[in-house]
Image: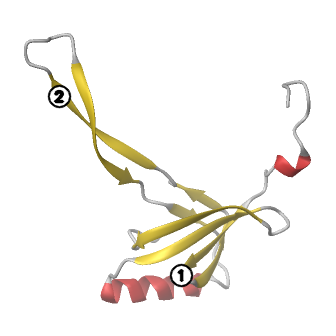
Amino acid sequence: MTASQPPDKKEIFVGVCFAVKLDKDNIGTFTSCEGLGLEVVMEQREEGGNNGLVWQLPTRMKYTNIKLSRPIGPDSAKLTKWIVKALNGLKPTTGVIQALDPEGKPVVTWSLDGVIPVRWT
């Protein structure tokens, strides 16, 4: 595709929502999803005798917290039920987040492991 051609309509996803499953239980759809990402933590090491060089060494991966937002609705009770269940045992669970197009068809899917609630407001 060149810059002068308009994009294919199938590639435009202006109005997406996010369907979320935790432990294979559907907890509803959300209007926004932020924080899907990771960071490679780098350690800096200065080489002795060579003042012009600092080594950047990868050490570990650090995942960001995911923030899901939506208005209160019928599925809100499902989320609070999962939070209460998780806090009683605090056992990490699995999750799936799907970005859905306006017709409800999946655009992309993320699989999550080690999911625990961090904050609810």
Residue sitting at 39 percent across and 45 percent down? 39
Residue sitting at 89 percent across and 43 percent down? 8
Residue that badge 2 annotates:
45
Which label number is shown at residue 62?
A: none
Residue that badge 1 annotates:
79
**Amino acid residing under circle 2:** Arg
Q: Is residue 69 left or right of residue 48?
A: right
Q: Residue 97 appears in which quarter of the rendering?
A: bottom right
For the residues bearing labels 2 and 1, Cβ distance under 8 angstroms: no
**Residue 105: percent from left, percent from top:** 80, 67
**Residue 3: percent from left, percent from top:** 84, 25
Q: Pick the quarter of the image with the N terminus.
A: top right
Residue sitting at 67 percent across and 80 percent down? 73
Q: Residue 89 appears in which quarter of the rendering?
A: bottom left
Considering every residue shown, the one lying at the far left of the view is: 49
Residue in the foreground of this view, choosing between 47 and 39: 47
Could you tell me how far apart the alpha carbons at marks 2 and 1 are, in whole angstroms? Answer: 45 Å
Secondary structure of the residue carrying tag 1 is helix
Q: Residue 6 appears in which quarter of the rendering?
A: top right
**Amino acid residing under circle 1:** Leu
